[in-house]
Amino acid sequence: MRAVCWMGAEDVRVRSVPEPVLQDPRDAIVRVTLTAICGSDLHLYDGCIPTMTRGDILGHEFMGEVVEVGSEIDNLRPGDRVVVPFPIACGHCQFCATERWSLCDNSNPNAAIAEEAWGHAPAGLFGYSHMLGGYDGGQAEYVRVPFADVGPLKVDGELADEQVLFLSDILPTGWQAALNCDIESGHVVAVWGCGPVGLFAIESALLMGAHRVVAIDRVPERLALAREAGALTIDYSERNVFDELREFTGGRGPDGCIDAVGMEAHGFGLLGGYDRVKQATMGQTDRPTALREAIQACGKGGTVSIPGVYGGVVDKLNLGAAFGKGLTLRMGQTHVHRYLPELLDHVRAGRFDATSLISHRVGLEDAPECYRMFRDKQDGCTKVVMKP
Amino acid sequence: MTLPPPQSHPPLPARPSTRRNVGRSERVGSFAGGSLLTWWALRSRADLPARLGLAALGAGLLQRAVSGYSPVNRLLDRDTAHARPNAMEIRTAKTVFRPREEIYTAWRHFERFPEVMHHLERVTVEGTSSHWVARVPGGLGTVRWDAEIVEEEFGKLLSWCSLPGSTIDNCGTVRFEEAPGGRGTEVHVSIVYRLPAGDVGRLAQRLFGGSFRRLVHEDVRRLQQAIELGRMASRPTETLEAKS
């Protein structure tokens, strides 16, 4: 079969690889009908995530048709149409039992590597480094789905692939980012990064009753999408974000600040240059420009919610500001499974418009080109979906 | 937390009674090195002073080997003849989301360990005694040992010690405690390995301590997965080697 493989930093190729086979009685094999490139895949593309090896199959946003199930799977049958959550969860450990699926104890066979770096190991993910399980991803014709009795969500034929695909990651991720802000009526929420997760965070925050949402980016088409989603926007290449936010909130600062950018923020000026040098010389792994700004701008007693991916050590993070203002910091991979039934209802009711952010509809063979285009934000690229 | 002693060995006098300060393994090493140097000195085509120097060094080492006494060791206040065995303790803990009794029962069935611990080839159990066969990494054969349960309290505690004549000299204790907040059972593992005395043992600890620690830690994780899932979780699809 054909699959999108990571062959090194900035080197993604479509290769012919063996088809996956059932390895465990709780596996299912899914024929992928639609898959997407995630903003977090760009961290892999840029070589920022350790423990990737040549030939790893990429992709953690995918859906498709079940073609084969293991002997212990009784909730799925060949022919079922499913969306698969990007974190893999066993359904039996203390974390799964408390619906913290992305922290599953048993789905990461390479937990020891993650423990070395982080002390404890989170769940395994599809196509996202060996440290996080070494599982083959879904940017391929077929994919093996472990613990298939726990993860996949069955969807009926009424909804198109494009309407439900994003339930695999970015919609629940934007949703959890807003949820983590504990939004109350009257709250102002600021969102850094108007990529797909940021856009879903904007819509989620408004659904949850935020008074206003302010979105921050510099790419014109992304700012336009944010305005369509109902946010006010700040172009950070033209305006001072901190001053604008303070002004807009009557001096209080936003109640919730969402960093939907993560470890490869585009910093400017002296500090931005410093970050690039430090990252290049391995003095730090991540460039936390958006996070720094969010902490600085966030109002007293507010919450900084971090759906953007961070991998390691950051520098010059003003923890004193967070402490002094009594901020709450919340972060982590999304517990996708927890939100699926509710979000599927929202999608059915048309409360989320999943399709308008798709800018490119291509085949697998266009992956190498699209990774570069998405990373460089060229050609109005906001979201790429691929039909294998 | 108190642990069982590595294994009781006779108390040693504070001061050595003989004029010996070179341990057995060092004496063997010195004998081999001394012989080799002397042989070189005799066979070498080098000039005379160099050969004499080699011969003197070789003779010194041979003397050290035969007498078991080394002035150098004395100068350094170093005594490897009367060193106590080194002990290496490995501890690890995991919280398993199951009741104590269930985990205890799973643990007590040593004979099933090889299903999840890939370095074990076979474990046979007879009452409180067990026979273990483990693979040496790199396909270098197997090591075997016999163990005896020395303390057992259903659902709470399990202690064992290897029996005399074992290649892997070890004692261990597993305690099972209810985790607070209904989060299952805390499994606390402590294993003490007895290593050769002196520098040889310390070197072994330095070389292999880390990998033993990881091995024990991974073994406990595998047991957790096997117990929580009713069997072993998925194996890594690929190791960290390029698929090329």
Image (cartoon, grey):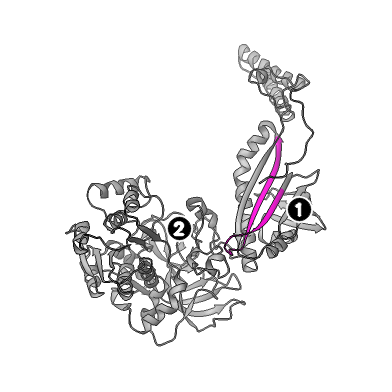
Camera-nearest residue between A72 and A331:
A331
Tell me which amino acid carries mark 1.
Trp
Residue A143 or residue A345, whichever sits in front: A345
**Residue A263 visible, this orientation:** yes
The span shown in magenta is B172-196
Task: Indicate the position of residue B243 as horizontal and vertical percent values.
Answer: 50, 59
The answer to whether residue A388 of the structure is visible from this angle is no
In the rendered image, residue A148, in percent from the top left (x then y), is placed at 54, 74
Disc 2 element: loop
Q: Are marks 2 and 1 in contact (CB under 8 Å)?
A: no
In the drawing, does residue A225 fall left or right of residue B91?
A: left
Mark 1 secondary-structure assignment: strand
> Could you tell me which residue is drawn at 30 percent across and 63 percent down?
A255
Q: Chain of mark 2?
A: A
Is residue B208 located in the magenta-colored stretch of the structure?
no
**Which marked residue is nearer to the observer: mark 2 or mark 1?**
1
Which chain letter matches label 1? B
Give the vertical position of B86 relative to A332 (above or below): above
Number of numbered discs: 2
The amino acid pointed to by label 2 is Arg
Where residue B132 is drawn, which disc sits there? Answer: 1
Q: Is residue B26 above or below residue B165?
A: above
Report the side of A388 relative to A146 (left or right): left
Please name the residue that numbered disc 2 is placed on. A54
Alpha-carbon neighbours of circle 2 within 10 Å: few (<14), some, or many (≥20)? some
> Which residue occupies the extreme left position in the image?
A238
Relative side of B29 to A315, left or right? right
Q: Main secondary structure of the magenta part?
A: strand
